[in-house]
Amino acid sequence: MKGAWRVWQRNWTVYRQTWRISFVPPLLEPLFYLLAFGIGLSALIGEITYRGVGISYIAFIAPALIAINIMQSAFFENTYASFVRMYYQKTFNAMLATPLSLEEVITGEIVWGATRSLIGTAIMMAVISAFGLIRYPEGLLLLPLALLGGLAFGAIAMLFTSIVPNIETFNLPIFLFITPMFLFSGTFFPIDALPPWAGSLAQFLPLTHLVRLARDLSYGQIGPEVFGSLAYLLLFTLVAYLLALRGMARRIIR
Amino acid sequence: MDEVIVAENLRKEYGTFRAVDGISFQVQRGECFGLLGPNGAGKTTTIRMLYGFTPKSAGSLSVLGLDLDTNLRTIKGRLGVCQQENTLDPDLTIEQNLEVFARYFDIPKGESRRRADELLAFIALDHRRHAKIPELSGGMMRRLMLARALINNPEIVILDEPTTGLDPQSRHQVWDRLEVLKNRGLSILLTTHYMDEAARLCDRLVIIDHGRILVEGEPRALIRRHVGDHLIEIVDPTDRLCTYIKNERLEHENLGYRMIVYAQEQGLYAKICSLGAQGCSLRQATLEDVFLRLTGRELRE
Ligand SMILES: Nc1ncnc2c1ncn2[C@@H]1O[C@H](COP(=O)(O)OP(=O)(O)OP(=O)(O)O)[C@@H](O)[C@H]1O
Ligand SMILES: [Mg+2]
């Protein structure tokens, strides 16, 4: 699996040339959201009860913004960007004429997607910490969480990449999978506010667990509940990863 | 002799279609071996099986004395592959393309720098080292593909149409480079649609069609065996001439406005000229004549 690291390095080499542009969204996005939702809506909403404790709305959504960014960074990297490398640039084909194996190429791509999540989280943490919304040292655990969440969403993204006929088709998983999660995973309002059937459904969404973990780590309330969510994310990652490897083998090896 | 590639009864099926239908050949160390054939003959499919990209349906393959199925990674580390399609990395500069590729072979940084410099000089692109790939002309990209295939100091290079789309200057430059490589003892497997290229570079070659080998041999010997040293080409043959050729049962091909007579006798040329044809010429037979004679003149789909 050393080859996966070589693939990761290739993406890192490219990223270093454009990092200034890549830095901007995770820096500004939380600012916009915190201003619009946090400050604008806070006045209307006031406090929110989370796990029996009242917290400000802005403190409620800050960890969710991190979780959403983890999801989106890896998902976009391993859909659009990976698809461009695979389909248009034939980068995978070139790699496969070297000692690298297809498993290494795909693993390297997914770990790179997770790295994008990690970088985004680090930047967002800096911004959000400036508002005093993350408790340390527990908050530092958001970084490994970003990697895990990045792997989960990178792997599922890679699975989509292995089956879409063309790049436009990514609109479908984004509309049917990413957008509903963005709205209904306990991100901007607690899951309790959903009707019970929808609440149970939400328990199957990976973002629900990522948001929950991000909150627990940000607030420093780390209890045994975290293990359930961690286990779910790990399992989700593993299954998506294995399916992505299989899908890619089907797509590329002919 | 020392065989670097041994392919036996190689087959590739896509559904019920046989793209490669039982091909056997050997490549000797230090030789340039040609794989010729019309579009869709199965050249690229064969090459892809050689570096493990396409799994073979049947047959056996050994490269550098190792079985391909069990030693793929080792073998790939000692091969250089220049694919038919451009697979250069457009996100990277020329120099980075070579250095990043070197990493895939675990070549340390200092060493890959040195090799990249050397190869850029070798393909005369050292003055463009910081250019991005989309800024290059097609010929420059092809040359860079060749250089990239050499980054790991391979023992065999596999070149799938390395000169397609190049201008005569670049083509000759690539030939020179390939001859240098051959003199250094590198084994080369080459596909090309340019018969002059194959005749010049290849020690031995096979012509394949519909996934099968039609002939194998040295270019000169193939020409002698299948066409002869010379042939007579006639533009706008007269009826009298056609009748003569038919009556004499000369081996020929009638292309309507043009006729080719495969005949060796010295006197014949004078006779044919005297029978009144506008343009009539005696010329040396080429590999292209062999190719067309064996694979026919119809277009491939
Ligand atoms: N992935 C695939 N699925 C189905 N058929 C394929 C596939 N790849 C190649 N073929 C078919 O196999 C045959 C051989 O193709 P191949 O690319 O090996 O030809 P080639 O000799 O390299 O031709 P060219 O000179 O045009 O490059 C063709 O008929 C092609 O359509
Ligand atoms: Mg081909």
Image (cartoon, helix red, strand yellow):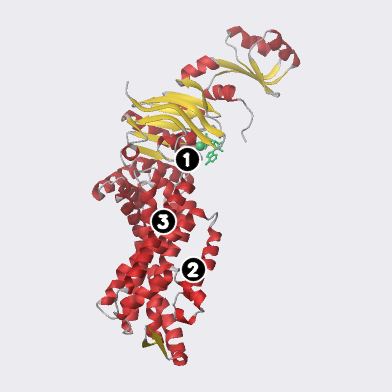
Q: Which of the labelled discs sits on residue B196, or is there none? A: none
Q: Which residue is mark 3?
A: B91
Q: Are marks 1 and 3 in contact (CB under 8 Å)?
A: no
* Mark 1 to mark 2 CA distance (whole Å): 38 Å
Residue A147, horizontal then vertical, whole percent: 33, 65
Q: Is residue B55 visible?
A: yes
Residue type marked 3: Asp
**Marks 3 and 2 share the same chain:** no
Is residue A183 depicted above or below B176 in this figure? below
Residue type marked 2: Ile
For mark 3, name the chain.
B
Q: Which residue is mark 1?
A: B84
Residue type marked 1: Gln
Q: Residues within 10 Å of mark 2 (few under 14, many from 20)?
A: some
For mark 2, name the chain.
A
- Asked which secondary structure carries label 1, the reply is loop
The residue at label 1 has a CB less than 8 Å from ligand 2: yes
Q: Residues within 10 Å of mark 3 (few under 14, many from 20)?
A: some
Q: Quadrant of residue A11?
A: bottom left
Q: Which sits earlier in the primary sequence, circle 1 or circle 3?
A: 1
